[in-house]
Image: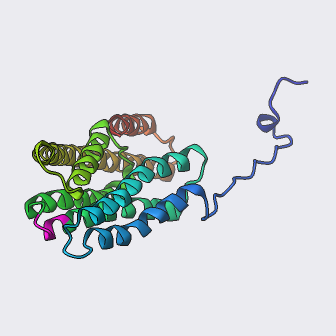
């Protein structure tokens, strides 16, 4: 025994363990597919007849509730059991927006919900989705507690509007929707702030790396040591730390 690891001594290397790739047909993706299939089913149930039949709206509420419940599990299962796939990354947010968007639009068509409420929520959700693509190469902003509370408030409020309610519950659902709209706006603005900070940090780090590379190239051209590389790396690390602080 020399006390030196084989990898450090240039000896035999252990083969890297094979990475298991999750297949398309896993439980997380199946739940996402179920949510996607529930969207047209929900619309047909809600809009059946004149759209005001209590029984059919109860069926529509059940479809909406199932979609919202499965949304709580598919992402968690994918991360916990390493079932993340490219399909899931694309289909999961689409399923989330589709069921909520369909419910809001249908309720506004039925004059149960003001169009401005539908417009505010859809504008926020679609805008944030586009902003994710704007900053995706710089990092990912995870869901915050406010965002999760927003989703819960939206689901509860829309579910109450789908049902035919009378009396105090009919008045109470308006306040629940008001809270949902407020959380939608506040969390949307906070996400925009974090996205801008993250993108600026990413661009600053990229510029620092480029400056370091130019310094090394210039030093090598003159036959000198790459002076200043430590400072550039330090600046890059500081920016990266700043970026991580907002993620």
Image quadrant where one finds the C terminus: top left
Q: Residue furthest right?
A: 1
User: Is residue 197 in view?
Assistant: no
Q: Residue 58: image x %, image y %?
A: 30, 59
Residue 46, by quadrant, is bottom left
Q: Give the range drawn in magenta.
A: 107-111
Is residue 140 depicted above or below 133 in this figure? above
In this view of the protein, which residue sits in the foreground, 183 or 179?
179
Q: Is residue 150 shown to the viewer in this render?
A: yes
Q: What residue is drawn where x is 38% and y is 37%?
A: 244
Taking 169 as reference, is 91 above or below it? below
Left or right: 19, with 108 as reference point: right
Secondary structure, magenta segment, majority class: helix
Query: What is the x, y in percent for residue 69?
Result: 41, 50
Residue plotted at (50% across, 43% down): 224
As drawn, 117 above or below 170: below
Rendered view: 55 above or below 183: below
The answer to whether residue 110 is magenta is yes
Residue 207 x %, y %: 34, 50
| Residue 166 colored in magenta in the image | no
Q: Residue at x 49, y 52 (%)?
A: 74
Relative depth, front residue between 222 and 210? 210
Image quadrant occupied by the N terminus: top right
């Amino acid at each position: 025994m020399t006390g030196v690891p084989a990898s450090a001594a240039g000896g035999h290397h252990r083969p890297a363990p094979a990475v298991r790739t999750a297949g398309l047909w896993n439980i997380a993706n199946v739940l996402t597919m179920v949510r996607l299939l529930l969207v047209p089913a929900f619309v047909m149930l809600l809009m059946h007849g004149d759209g005001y039949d209590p029984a059919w709206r109860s069926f529509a509420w059940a479809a909406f509730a199932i979609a919202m419940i499965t949304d709580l599990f598919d992402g968690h299962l994918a991360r916990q059991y390493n079932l993340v796939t490219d399909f899931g990354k694309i289909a999961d947010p689409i399923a989330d927006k589709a069921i909520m968007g369909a419910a809001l639009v249908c309720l506004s068509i039925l004059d149960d919900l003001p169009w401005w409420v539908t417009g505010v929520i859809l504008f926020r959700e679609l805008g944030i989705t586009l902003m994710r693509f704007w900053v995706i190469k710089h990092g990912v902003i995870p869901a915050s507690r406010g965002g999760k509370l927003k989703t819960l408030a939206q689901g509860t409020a829309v579910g109450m509007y789908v049902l035919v309610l009378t009396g105090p519950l009919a008045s109470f659902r308006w306040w629940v929707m008001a809270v949902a709209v407020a959380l939608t706006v506040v969390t949307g603005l906070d996400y925009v702030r974090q996205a801008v900070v993250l993108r600026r940090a990413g661009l600053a780090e990229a510029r620092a790396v480029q400056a370091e590379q130019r310094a090394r190239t210039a030093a090598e051209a003159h036959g000198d040591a790459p002076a200043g590389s430590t400072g550039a790396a330090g600046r890059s690390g500081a920016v990266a730390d700043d970026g991580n602080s907002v993620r």
